Image (cartoon, rainbow, N blue to C red):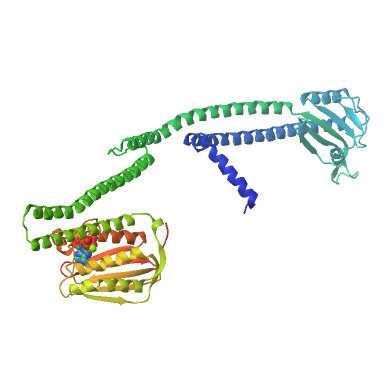
């Protein structure tokens, strides 16, 4: 729209404006705003009032002179002045007029010859100017020369005569000559100057008031913001538990509230991290403690039978497997906590993927006598991170098998619309109590802690699942009835939406 040079100029201007840091200060902005609001009406009013005064003054002066001149014109005719300029009375009258208006009066006859000039320099000369010529034809003209400070007026000197000898005929006016008057407007200019000076003084006072008001006003307006900066600095230094509360104005209250929410969230995150670390330590220690007990009892028993060694060593191997499982899950979870940059998005055939997972889990299902069913409504292909989606589906199916009943079933359904694909994992298992439903995605959470030992599992599976779903900007939902079964529904966008 602007062309390359225009764009360059705009960028440069933006940079310069950005460098002018004082313009970004709220104080400067308040000052400039007040200045504009205060000064603009002042200037407009001054201009309008002075302009109006000048027009009116010139108009009044012009009409005043015109009246005087018309009276004089009658006298000129009466005294036949155009033919004979010796009349003392008329000369005195003309001089008086020129003195009165601080100007020049010229009487011109119909031959355009100047018969009288109060300056006495142009008498008997012929004058040919547009105004005079127009005036000879009966037109009155007036002109205001602002730069040189005078009003020029031409008035025809007319005589009324009966056009015919008979009285009945209408009378006509015949132009016998012209009066040309230049009157000074010095007094008007002087008044204008005085008015203008007064207006300037008022403007100066307004500026002064604005400066004082903006300095004081800015200080009052800025104070809450300075307070909040101070409070934020304090909070940052010492990670205080105090909430920020600057109630001086609504805006700062909002800033404070927003910050308090961030602070609250930070505290929650901090707490959950601490809890996570202590949970991890505890979970990792449990198998170690068992192994230690098993090993100690073998050591303390001299001549223990080989069968006992065999049995205890098996237990120790199981504990090592468990430790391994926890660490694997933890690593998977940590990976899920990373950013979207770690996503490895490829186009994946979800039907094939689900079938693969089912085939891998079928032996476990058979061992527990659980029937595994896959129902695909349509072929689905989506842009996802294959590893993460595999974790999601296998975790859900694994749980559905693990927390099932004898002769139970697990049904996996795959469907899609134009935006999302949906994987539903339904089971005929033990179900999840309602008050546990909110917690199942928490790390290390298990509904029945005592049973988990025989069933296995780390309590990290659903945490990993949920994170993987969220990383795909998808959603996960659970419905469960205790003793009847559970249904997990996962919805993932068909095409990955980056950050
Ligand atoms: N399909 C299900 N049926 C019943 N309970 C379930 C089901 N899926 C998960 N749960 C409950 O949620 C808890 C958390 O699951 P998860 O995070 O996968 O941990 P884990 O399977 O390792 O115990 C499980 O311990 C279990 O109590
Ligand atoms: Mg699990």
- In which quarter of the view is residue 487 placed? bottom left
Q: Name the foreground residue: 55 vs 399.
A: 399
Residue 127 drawn at (x, y percent): 90, 35
**Residue 414: x, y in percent?**
32, 73
Name the outermost residue toward the front.
303
Front one among 133 and 358: 358
> From the image, which quarter does the N terminus lie in?
bottom right
Where, quadrant-wise, is the C terminus in this rendering?
bottom left
- Image mark count: 0
Q: Nearer the viewer, residue 273 or 82?
A: 273
- Residue under the image location 78 percent in, 25 percent down: 102
Residue 344 falls left or right of residue 17? left
Residue in the picture at 53% in, 40% down:
18
- Say which of 145 and 367 sits in front: 367
Against 496, is 286 above or below? above
Q: Is residue 179 left or right of residue 348?
A: right
Quadrant housing residue 409: bottom left
Residue located at (87% from left, 27% from top): 117
């Amino acid at each position: 729209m602007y062309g390359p040079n225009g764009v360059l100029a705009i960028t440069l201007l933006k940079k310069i404006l950005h460098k002018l840091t004082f313009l970004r200060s709220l104080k400067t902005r308040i000052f400039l705003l007040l200045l504009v609001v205060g000064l603009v009406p002042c200037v407009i009013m001054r201009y309008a009032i002075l302009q109006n005064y000048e027009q009116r003054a010139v108009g009044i002066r012009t009409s005043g002179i015109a009246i005087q001149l018309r009276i004089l014109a009658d006298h000129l005719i009466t005294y036949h002045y155009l033919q004979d300029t010796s009349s003392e009375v008329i000369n005195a009258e003309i001089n008086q007029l020129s003195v009165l208006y601080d100007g020049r009066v010229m009487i011109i006859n119909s031959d355009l010859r100047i018969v009288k000039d109060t300056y006495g320099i142009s008498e008997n000369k012929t004058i040919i100017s547009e105004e005079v010529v127009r005036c000879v034809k009966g037109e009155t003209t007036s002109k205001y020369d602002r730069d040189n400070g005078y009003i020029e007026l031409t008035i025809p000197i007319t005589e009324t005569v009966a056009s015919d000898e008979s009285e009945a005929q209408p009378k006509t006016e015949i132009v016998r000559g012209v009066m040309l008057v230049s009157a000074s407007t010095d007094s008007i200019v002087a008044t204008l100057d005085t008015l203008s000076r007064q207006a300037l003084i008022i403007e100066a006072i307004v500026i002064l008031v604005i400066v004082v008001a903006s300095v004081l006003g800015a200080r009052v307006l800025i104070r809450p913001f300075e307070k909040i900066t101070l409070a934020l600095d304090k909070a940052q230094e010492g990670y205080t538990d105090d909430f920020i509360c600057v109630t001086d104005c609504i805006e700062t209250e909002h800033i404070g509230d927003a910050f308090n929410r961030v602070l609250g969230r930070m505290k929650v995150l901090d707490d959950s991290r601490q809890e996570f670390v202590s949970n991890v330590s505890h979970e990792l220690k449990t198998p170690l403690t068992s192994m230690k007990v098993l090993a100690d009892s073998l050591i303390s028993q001299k001549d223990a039978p080989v069968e006992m060694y065999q049995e205890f060593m098996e237990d120790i191997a199981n504990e090592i497997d468990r430790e391994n499982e926890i660490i694997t899950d933890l690593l998977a979870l940590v990976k899920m906590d990373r950013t979207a940059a770690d996503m490895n998005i490829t186009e994946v055939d979800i039907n094939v993927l689900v079938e693969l997972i089912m085939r891998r889990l079928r032996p476990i299902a058979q061992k527990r006598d659980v029937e595994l069913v896959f129902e695909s409504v349509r072929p689905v292909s989506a842009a996802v991170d294959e590893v993460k989606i595999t974790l999601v589906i296998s975790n859900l199916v694994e749980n559905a098998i693990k927390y099932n009943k004898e002769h139970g079933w697990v049904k996996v359904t795959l469907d899609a619309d134009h935006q999302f694909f949906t994987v539903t994992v339904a089971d005929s298992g033990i179900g999840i109590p309602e008050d546990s439903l909110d917690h199942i995605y928490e790390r290390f959470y298990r509904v029945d802690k005592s049973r988990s030992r025989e069933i296995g599992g780390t309590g990290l599976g659903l945490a990993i699942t949920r994170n993987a779903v969220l990383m795909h900007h998808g959603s996960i939902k659970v419905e469960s009835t205790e003793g009847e079964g559970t249904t997990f529904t996962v919805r993932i966008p068909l095409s990955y939406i980056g950050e």
